[in-house]
Image: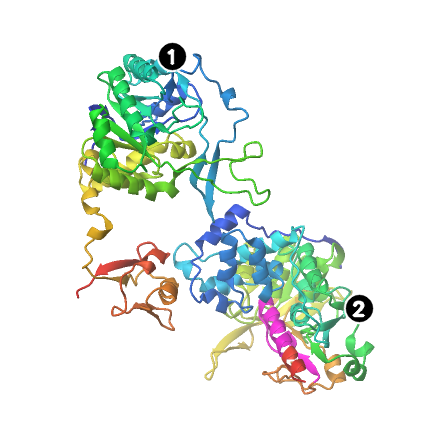
Amino acid sequence: MPNMPKVIKGFDEETTTLSYPEALEEAGRCYLCYNAPCREALPAKTDIAGFIARMRSRNFRGALRLVKETNFFPGITSRVSPYDQQCEEACLRKIYGGPVRIAELERVLAEYDRNSKNPYLPEIPESIDKTVAIVGSGPTGLSAAVELVLNGCKVIMYESARIAGGVFTKGIPSYLISDEVIEYEVNGVLELGVDLVTGINAGESINLVSMKRSFDALLLAIGMGVPRKLPVQGSEKGDIFTGLEILESLKLKEKRLRLGENIVIVGGGNVSLDVTAALLKLGIDTVTLLYRRDREHMPVFKSRYRLAEEMGVKIKFRTVLKEIISNDQRTITEVVCQKNELKEKDDSQQVVAEPIEGSEFTLPADTVIFSIGQELDRDLVEMFDLETTEEGRIKVDPETNQTNDSFIFAAGSCVERIDTLVDAIARGQDTARKIVRKLLEE
Amino acid sequence: MEVNLGLNFCGVNFPNPFVVSKVPPVGDVEIIAAQLEAGWGGVILRNASLNTAAGKQTITALRGKAPLYRGVDYEEKRIIDLGWIEPQAPISVEEAESSIRTLKERFPDSVVIAGMVGTSREEWLKVSRRLSQAGADMIECDFSISNGNSADVKTVIAHDLKLMEKASRYVREGARSTPVILKVPGTLPEREMIVETLKEAGANALNLFYEPKGVPGINLTNFIPFPNVGGKSTLSIMGGAAIKPYVLGILAEWGIANKRLGLSVLGGAYNWRDCVELILMGASILQFHGAVLQRGVRFVDELKSGVSDYLSEKMISSVEKLVGKSLPYFVTEENLPRSSLVAAAIDEEICTHCGICYQICEGLGYHAINFSDQRKPMIDKKKCVGDGLCVAACPVFNCMSLRRVSR
């Protein structure tokens, strides 16, 4: 029987926020260390001890201002980024009753701001008479936009999707963060006076020549927009999705999805875990995740793995997908998998997975979801004649973040591997500073 | 080890040194009975006065005067202190007499101290006599109130030694053989003379309290200081953890000046450690007000357990042996022995490498702490003067200390 479309309603946020008494008590646990190591351990380099000290004296507004200096999206990052593996891991208090719960405190501030009648808006300095165009409104693009505006630039932002936010809006399941929180913090950027043009593919609509005429610089923060699919046999028919497609669908309030009862997910990253957890939450029992290596090799956040585990995820480690088998009605009936053996490379700490001959086995399946990462959208790169790296990303000068065309800057995951949203935000801010420096030199 | 929390104070046997002072400000005898039931060593009844009409005060007397209390917060700590406006409401002598009789009948082994005020010879004599006849174990005459005789200039009785002496003689005469405690501000100067004079006038003990009043805080939204009584505020009596250092200081000074009168102290103790400190500094009886209001009557269990476990651990058989034990170590500043050398030391086992000691010594101290790239603080004994700033600032309990060093 072919898969019936299921009506899926969005999730309610399950992340909770500490009450003020709890927050004050938690803030009181912080030692306010000298040269506090938590700061270095968070890519955004937020002055954590500084904002906690302000919280302690109940100066929440001042605390939020300090956070926003380095991270304009505390409501989002404190819900989604793995602070427990970054700043909280570095907390010196951890040997006495566990680390200070920094993410929780930052979230209290973000919620304080969101509920405030008089939310925080930074002061915009005098114009330096420079205009920068940004392509892509994900975390890198948005945070670059903030930094540029706060340095007196005018910013025009192009987004191919209907709304701004990139991975903020598309890639995070709603049970971790509500749309309202994302919308609030993304709108906060637009309120600074950033012009947003949505539904436009920058390269197609405006050519480079006219861009160079209208703008002083162009920043590409386009991410890795194209989800990969494994070119295995049978992957051209039947109910085959990508992880991002599923996550994006689940963000909609109501969506019809042709999902079966036996779902196989290929890939072992955060997106795979998120998709798995989300499907399990929807009541689909049989979700099997295939990962080619072992648990310790999975590039995932501890908290996300824990959540998927609690939901009852089944993971087949050292397993790859070899073939998808469908019937005459183009309905998937089963998948053929193969076991891997792991070999340590002599010259590096990387572990290589090699398939074991004759270890094939089949799993019943009616839906396959690929979640094996994304690649660069080549259109823009080719249109702008940009050089790329072996890894398939845009090549930039690490000092300046300029591409081979000095007018064009690039930042974020289209340039390098980015593990967390806080990293993406930090890269955006950092690159914006480089752009300002270059524009002022001219 | 069996330890004895009981002690003899001016001839009266207290089952323990913890006494509830006039809690709550208005209420009937059953509330006080519950305090003795819970195991407090004694209670002090609200001040009796001739000028109060007979008949019990009811809670409605407080309507319109409230709120009385305001907690003092500090950063994340709720209520480190309590300020309150005392309703000026003495009880009638009849009510006091009836309370004494009820309580003594039901709790013959607990101590019932009758509070009183007076502003005339007649009142001092008559009230003390009637309280004594009713069976009060002790009488505490409160000299912290104003002398109501003069309408224009109100003097606090305790600020006029002659008046205090006169009043003490009348109370002594009225109380006959019942021991008399005089409640005086611990902040009074000329302590030796006061002790001599009041002892001669027949007093048995002093109950010291911290006189300066305070303002617990201000509401930053509407600018009205706390507590907000119908849109206005006034000075509050302060008690609790924040005044402990002052109360200890008061006790130290009286403890040295006084060899002849028993000492009781009101306020400053919020846990058993505070209690031990106050006793070591010379108080025999500890009076509680704010702490009982905050923690309830069962709070005495914590105090009793804390002090007796401490005594057991120290192998001291009785709380009486602690009284004044710290006084020999207390001298005036010019008599401090300034010849011993100390330097800071760090317990590396428990150090978290937070760097606060380094930051503070580098900033306002004598640059005597080195801080390595591995975040390991090291004391430079040549530079350390032993001022103790780092010890005070270190957030980890018992991690830093001052150690004696040879010259």
Mark 1: amino acid: Glu
Report the side of B198 relative to A233 (left or right).
left
User: Which residue is more in the foreground, B257 or B87?
Assistant: B257
Among the 4 quarters of the image, the one containing residue B399: bottom left
* Rendered residue at 24%/22% (across/down): B179
Dividing the image into 4 quarters, which one contains the N terminus of chain A? Answer: bottom right
Residue that appears at 24% across and 18% down: B178
The residue located at (43%, 25%) in the rendering is B25
Q: Find residue B23 and report its horizontal and vertical position in percent.
A: 40, 27
The residue segment tinted magenta is: A407-434
- Give me the disc on residue B94: 1
User: Is A180 on the left-hand or right-hand side of B311?
Assistant: right
- A198 drawn magenta: no
Provide residue A240's location: percent of width, then percent of height: 71, 67
- In the rendered image of this protein, does residue B248 appear above or below residue B169? below
Viewer-proximal residue among A270 and A101: A101
Quadrant of the snapshot with the C terminus of chain A: bottom right
Compared with residue A77, is residue B189 higher up or lower down, i.e. above or below?
Answer: above
Going by the numbered disc 2, the residue's amino acid type is Gly
Q: Is residue A3 visible?
A: no
Depth order, front residue of A246/A361: A246
Is A186 displayed left or right of B130 in the figure?
right
B92 to A119, vertically: above or below: above
Circle 2 residue = A199
- Mark 2 belongs to chain: A
> Dot 2, crowdedness within 10 Å: few (<14), some or many (≥20)?
few
Instruction: Characterize the magenta stretch by its predominant secondary structure.
Output: helix
Decide whether residue A427 is among the magenta residues. Answer: yes
Residue A433, image quadrant: bottom right
Name the spot of residue B111 as percent of width and height, x first: 28, 22
How far across and how far down the image is residue A54, in percent? Answer: 52, 56
Q: Residue A397 carries which label?
A: none
